[in-house]
Image: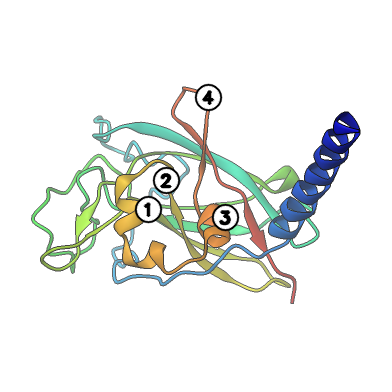
Amino acid sequence: MKRRAFIKSGVLGTVASVITTSTQAKMVTPSEVEGPFYPITPRKDQDADLTRVAGKGGLAQGEIIDVFGQVLDTDLKPVEGVTLDLWQANSFGKYHHPHDTNSAPVDEHFQAWAIMQSGSEGRYKFKTVIPGAYPLGRNQQRTPHIHFKIAKNGYVSLLTQMYFPNQVLNEQDGLFKRKSASEQAMMTAKAVGKSNQYQYDIIIEKL
């Protein structure tokens, strides 16, 4: 009887897990504020490698990473041809933006901004550096994050931020803390292996 009870509880646990995962998967990726530093200075180089700037020989400073994932709809079907407009602070926590008064240095070899489209099966990939934290007032810091604007005709546009796992500042970040546990999970990239790769899947909603 104990064995049967154990098997039954295991089966029920597995079913509950599947139901929970399915429910979470159909949630739209949570939205977030744009912030004050969306790029306003035109840059010719907006490709998927943010670690180099066209015409300059140097490499961006910081920990270089690959971010990849899929754009899906709420039925978990891949969405091809989605425009992903992304920007972030450099490894010192400085935005390449004239209104950023942070005293951290500008990295002239960091592209800071990219625009791309999801390809076959809704997949996308870009190379960048882990953004640094930056001060927010006297006693606060924003945890490392990457901004995304996501758009395609026939779908609800999405403005969100991608967070990194195992960041101590996540639990102190005001915007991150406002989200529920399931929302935080959807907005946090997953570390893949030991090769500085992060997976971040995005779910958008049809109009």
As helix, strand or loop, the secondary structure at mark 4 comes to loop
CA distance separating discs 2 and 3: 11 Å
As helix, strand or loop, the secondary structure at mark 2 comes to loop
Q: Give the residue pinned by disc 1.
A: 145
Whether pointer 1 and pointer 2 mark residues with C-beta atoms closer than 8 Å, the reply is: yes
Identify the amino acid type marked 2.
Phe
Residue that protrudes farthest toward the bottom in the picture: 207
Give above or below for 9 relative to 16: above
Q: Position of residue 175 (x, y in %)?
A: 37, 67
Q: Is residue 74 left or right of residue 104?
A: right
Q: Give the residue pinned by disc 3.
A: 186
Q: Position of residue 189 (x, y in %)?
A: 51, 45
Whether pointer 1 and pointer 3 mark residues with C-beta atoms closer than 8 Å, the reply is: no
CA distance separating discs 1 and 4: 20 Å
Label 2, residues with CA under 10 Å away: few <14, some 14-19, many ≥20 = many
Q: Is residue 5 left or right of residue 194?
A: right
As helix, strand or loop, the secondary structure at mark 1 comes to strand
Query: In this view of the protein, can residue 79 be seen by the observer?
Result: no
Q: Give the residue pinned by disc 2.
A: 164
Identify the amino acid type marked 1.
His
Identify the amino acid type marked 4.
Gly
Residue mark closest to the camera, 1 vs 3: 3
